């Protein structure tokens, strides 16, 4: 997926899907893969709401996803905002279905969550994300 340079003009090795593909190809082994941060990968894409599913399929069919940071964003490459899990551009139910389609059976965990005003322990956003993930898993398994 061709695109311009990275943040402040710096292209990082693992800052693109192509870079991640090169990384998992360095040493073929069932023990070499990714902590697949769906939000970070979505941030690498011009149109994450359309493109993320094929990226999940590419890494998932090769068994290179070892665990998933399951979060959502609004926007795309170099112009994005982190959102609550249900408020971004990626259809998270569809994403969960793709993980199941490729046979992924590992952890689905929240990553960054927006702060909730007045939540001194910063736990409400994570609790919401965990509940949402649990509901998506139940919906996909139904």
Image: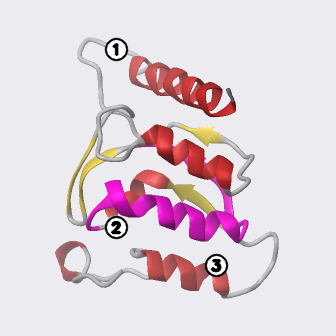
Residue at 67 percent of width and 88 percent of height? 26
CA–CA distance between discs 3 and 1?
40 Å
Residue found farthest to the front: 142
Report which quarter residue 65 is drawn in: bottom right
Q: What stretch is highlighted in magenta?
A: 46-71
Say the numbered circle drawn on residue 44: 2
Residue at coordinates 64% horizontally, 25% vertically from top-left? 138
Counting from the top left corner in percent of width and height, residue 27 is at: 73, 86
Element under disc 1: loop
Which of disc 1 and disc 3 is earlier in sequence? 3
**Where in the figure is residue 134, as x and y percent of width and height?**
60, 25
What residue did someone put label 1 on? 120
Say which element carries label 3.
Answer: helix
Q: Where does the image place residue 104, in percent across and percent down from the top left?
A: 71, 52
- CA–CA distance between discs 1 and 2? 32 Å
Can residue 64 be seen in this snapshot?
A: no
| Side of 57 relative to 79 (left or right) | right
Mark nearer the N terminus (3 vs 2): 3
- Kindly identify which residue carries mark 3: 24
Front-most of 90 and 11?
A: 90
Residues marked 3 and 2 touching at CB (< 8 Å): no
The 10 Å Cα crowd at callout 1, few under 14, some 14 to 19, many 20 or more, is few
């Amino acid at each position: 997926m061709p695109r311009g340079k990275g943040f402040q003009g710096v292209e990082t090795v693992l800052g693109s899907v192509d870079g991640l593909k090169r990384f998992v190809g360095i040493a073929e082994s069932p023990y070499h893969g990714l902590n697949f941060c769906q939000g970070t990968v979505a941030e690498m894409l011009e149109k994450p709401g359309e493109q993320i599913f094929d990226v999940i399929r590419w890494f998932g069919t090769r068994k290179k996803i070892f665990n998933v940071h399951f979060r959502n964003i609004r926007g795309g490459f170099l112009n994005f905002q982190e959102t609550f899990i249900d408020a971004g551009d990626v259809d998270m139910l569809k994403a969960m279905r793709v993980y199941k389609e490729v046979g992924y059976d590992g952890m689905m965990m929240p990553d960054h969550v927006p702060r909730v005003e007045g939540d001194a322990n910063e736990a409400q956003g994570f609790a919401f994300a965990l509940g949402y993930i649990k509901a998506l898993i139940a919906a996909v398994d139904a």
